[in-house]
Amino acid sequence: MGVDARYAGISRVVGIRGGFFTLLVLCAFLRPGGLAALDTTTITVGGVPLVVEVADDVMERSQGLMYRESLPHDRGMLFVFPDEAVRAFWMKTTRIPLSIAFADAEGVIIAIMDMFPDDGRARYRSPSPAKYALEVNRGWFAERGVTVGSTIDIN
Protein backbone atom coordinates (compact mmCIF):
# COMPACT_ATOMS: atom_id res chain seq x y z
CA MET A 1 0.00 0.00 0.00
CA GLY A 2 1.44 3.38 -1.01
CA VAL A 3 1.28 6.74 0.71
CA ASP A 4 -0.97 9.36 -0.82
CA ALA A 5 1.26 12.05 -2.38
CA ARG A 6 -0.63 14.76 -0.43
CA TYR A 7 0.58 13.27 2.88
CA ALA A 8 4.07 12.18 1.92
CA GLY A 9 5.64 15.56 2.79
CA ILE A 10 3.76 15.78 6.09
CA SER A 11 4.79 12.25 6.99
CA ARG A 12 8.43 13.05 6.28
CA VAL A 13 8.34 16.23 8.45
CA VAL A 14 6.58 14.43 11.31
CA GLY A 15 9.11 11.60 11.04
CA ILE A 16 12.05 14.01 11.15
CA ARG A 17 10.59 15.98 14.07
CA GLY A 18 9.70 12.78 15.92
CA GLY A 19 13.20 11.42 15.37
CA PHE A 20 14.76 14.69 16.52
CA PHE A 21 12.62 14.71 19.67
CA THR A 22 13.60 11.10 20.40
CA LEU A 23 17.26 12.00 19.93
CA LEU A 24 16.95 14.93 22.36
CA VAL A 25 15.32 12.73 25.00
CA LEU A 26 18.00 10.06 24.59
CA CYS A 27 20.79 12.62 24.87
CA ALA A 28 19.24 13.99 28.05
CA PHE A 29 19.20 10.54 29.62
CA LEU A 30 22.67 9.59 28.43
CA ARG A 31 24.46 12.65 29.71
CA PRO A 32 25.98 12.45 33.19
CA GLY A 33 23.28 12.85 35.81
CA GLY A 34 20.38 12.12 33.44
CA LEU A 35 17.70 14.74 32.92
CA ALA A 36 18.59 16.66 36.04
CA ALA A 37 21.53 16.50 38.39
CA LEU A 38 20.93 14.26 41.35
CA ASP A 39 20.63 15.75 44.82
CA THR A 40 23.90 15.71 46.73
CA THR A 41 24.60 15.47 50.43
CA THR A 42 27.57 14.88 52.67
CA ILE A 43 27.71 11.60 54.56
CA THR A 44 30.43 10.02 56.67
CA VAL A 45 31.84 6.60 55.89
CA GLY A 46 33.84 5.12 58.72
CA GLY A 47 34.15 8.68 60.05
CA VAL A 48 35.40 10.06 56.70
CA PRO A 49 33.25 12.77 55.07
CA LEU A 50 32.14 12.10 51.50
CA VAL A 51 29.95 14.12 49.14
CA VAL A 52 27.52 11.79 47.38
CA GLU A 53 24.88 11.98 44.72
CA VAL A 54 21.75 10.32 46.06
CA ALA A 55 20.00 7.81 43.78
CA ASP A 56 16.76 7.12 45.60
CA ASP A 57 14.22 6.32 42.91
CA VAL A 58 14.01 3.57 40.30
CA MET A 59 15.25 5.67 37.38
CA GLU A 60 18.19 7.16 39.29
CA ARG A 61 19.22 3.76 40.66
CA SER A 62 18.94 2.20 37.20
CA GLN A 63 21.23 4.77 35.59
CA GLY A 64 23.70 5.04 38.45
CA LEU A 65 27.12 6.05 37.14
CA MET A 66 26.56 4.69 33.64
CA TYR A 67 28.11 6.60 30.73
CA ARG A 68 30.35 8.72 32.95
CA GLU A 69 34.00 9.12 32.08
CA SER A 70 35.17 10.02 35.59
CA LEU A 71 34.17 10.54 39.19
CA PRO A 72 35.92 13.16 41.35
CA HIS A 73 38.14 11.50 43.98
CA ASP A 74 36.13 13.00 46.85
CA ARG A 75 32.70 12.00 45.50
CA GLY A 76 30.48 8.95 45.32
CA MET A 77 26.95 7.77 44.63
CA LEU A 78 24.68 6.50 47.38
CA PHE A 79 21.91 4.15 46.29
CA VAL A 80 18.98 4.19 48.72
CA PHE A 81 16.40 1.42 48.48
CA PRO A 82 12.94 1.35 50.06
CA ASP A 83 13.65 -1.95 51.85
CA GLU A 84 16.38 -4.39 52.75
CA ALA A 85 17.02 -7.14 50.21
CA VAL A 86 19.95 -8.89 48.59
CA ARG A 87 21.19 -6.38 46.00
CA ALA A 88 23.03 -7.02 42.74
CA PHE A 89 24.93 -4.45 40.70
CA TRP A 90 26.62 -4.64 37.32
CA MET A 91 28.99 -2.41 35.40
CA LYS A 92 27.32 -2.33 32.00
CA THR A 93 28.29 0.92 30.22
CA THR A 94 30.13 2.06 33.35
CA ARG A 95 33.61 3.16 32.37
CA ILE A 96 34.95 4.06 35.83
CA PRO A 97 36.67 1.41 37.99
CA LEU A 98 34.64 1.46 41.21
CA SER A 99 34.41 -0.04 44.66
CA ILE A 100 31.01 -0.73 46.19
CA ALA A 101 29.98 -1.07 49.81
CA PHE A 102 26.68 -2.67 50.74
CA ALA A 103 25.15 -1.58 54.07
CA ASP A 104 22.17 -2.72 56.10
CA ALA A 105 19.34 -0.49 57.35
CA GLU A 106 21.49 0.70 60.27
CA GLY A 107 24.26 1.76 57.89
CA VAL A 108 26.65 -1.02 58.89
CA ILE A 109 28.79 -2.08 55.94
CA ILE A 110 28.26 -5.79 55.25
CA ALA A 111 30.49 -6.11 52.16
CA ILE A 112 32.99 -4.15 50.08
CA MET A 113 33.87 -5.22 46.54
CA ASP A 114 36.02 -3.86 43.73
CA MET A 115 34.17 -3.58 40.42
CA PHE A 116 35.67 -3.44 36.95
CA PRO A 117 34.33 -1.79 33.78
CA ASP A 118 32.94 -4.54 31.55
CA ASP A 119 30.07 -5.46 29.30
CA GLY A 120 27.63 -6.04 32.17
CA ARG A 121 28.04 -9.79 32.55
CA ALA A 122 29.64 -9.71 36.01
CA ARG A 123 27.27 -9.26 38.96
CA TYR A 124 28.31 -7.90 42.34
CA ARG A 125 25.88 -9.17 44.99
CA SER A 126 25.46 -8.30 48.63
CA PRO A 127 25.97 -11.39 50.80
CA SER A 128 22.93 -10.50 52.90
CA PRO A 129 20.07 -7.97 52.75
CA ALA A 130 21.17 -4.37 52.19
CA LYS A 131 19.28 -1.08 52.17
CA TYR A 132 22.18 1.01 50.89
CA ALA A 133 24.93 0.67 48.32
CA LEU A 134 27.74 3.19 48.01
CA GLU A 135 29.89 3.45 44.89
CA VAL A 136 33.20 5.31 44.94
CA ASN A 137 36.39 5.23 42.88
CA ARG A 138 38.11 1.85 43.18
CA GLY A 139 40.38 1.79 46.21
CA TRP A 140 38.68 4.66 48.08
CA PHE A 141 37.56 2.45 50.98
CA ALA A 142 40.96 0.76 51.39
CA GLU A 143 42.84 4.07 51.20
CA ARG A 144 40.77 5.44 54.08
CA GLY A 145 40.71 2.32 56.25
CA VAL A 146 36.99 1.70 55.73
CA THR A 147 36.21 -2.00 56.22
CA VAL A 148 33.30 -4.36 56.72
CA GLY A 149 31.73 -3.34 60.04
CA SER A 150 32.39 0.40 59.49
CA THR A 151 29.28 2.53 59.30
CA ILE A 152 27.77 4.89 56.79
CA ASP A 153 26.19 7.85 58.61
CA ILE A 154 23.62 9.42 56.33
CA ASN A 155 22.18 12.00 58.70
Image (cartoon, helix red, strand yellow):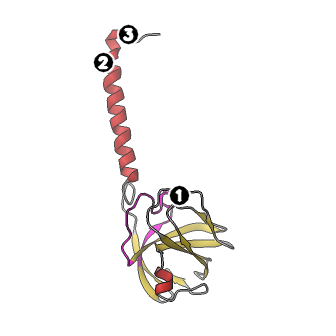
Query: Range of the magenta residues?
Result: 51-74
Residue at image position (36%, 41%) is 23
Depth check: 153 or 138 in front? 138
Whether 112 is among the magenta residues is no
Coordinates of residue 81 in the picture (x, y in percent)? 57, 67
Residue appearing at x 47%, y 75% in the figure: 138
Q: Is residue 66 magenta?
A: yes
Q: Residue at x 63, y 72 (%)?
A: 130
How far apart are the alpha carbons under marks 3 and 1? 44 Å
Instruction: Determine whether 144 is above or below 125 in the image.
Output: below
Mark 3 vs 1: CB contact within 8 A? no
Taking the image as drawn, is residue 3 in sight?
yes
Discs 1, 2 touching: Cβ within 8 Å = no
- Residue type at numbered disc 2: Gly
Disc 1 crowd rating (10 Å Cα; few below 14, some 14-19, many 20+) is few
- Residue type at mark 1 is Val
In whole angstroms, how far apart are the C-alphas of marks 3 and 2?
Answer: 10 Å
Q: Which residue is mark 2?
A: 9
Position above or below: 104 against 12: below
Q: Which residue is mark 3?
A: 4
Q: Which mark is residue 58?
A: 1
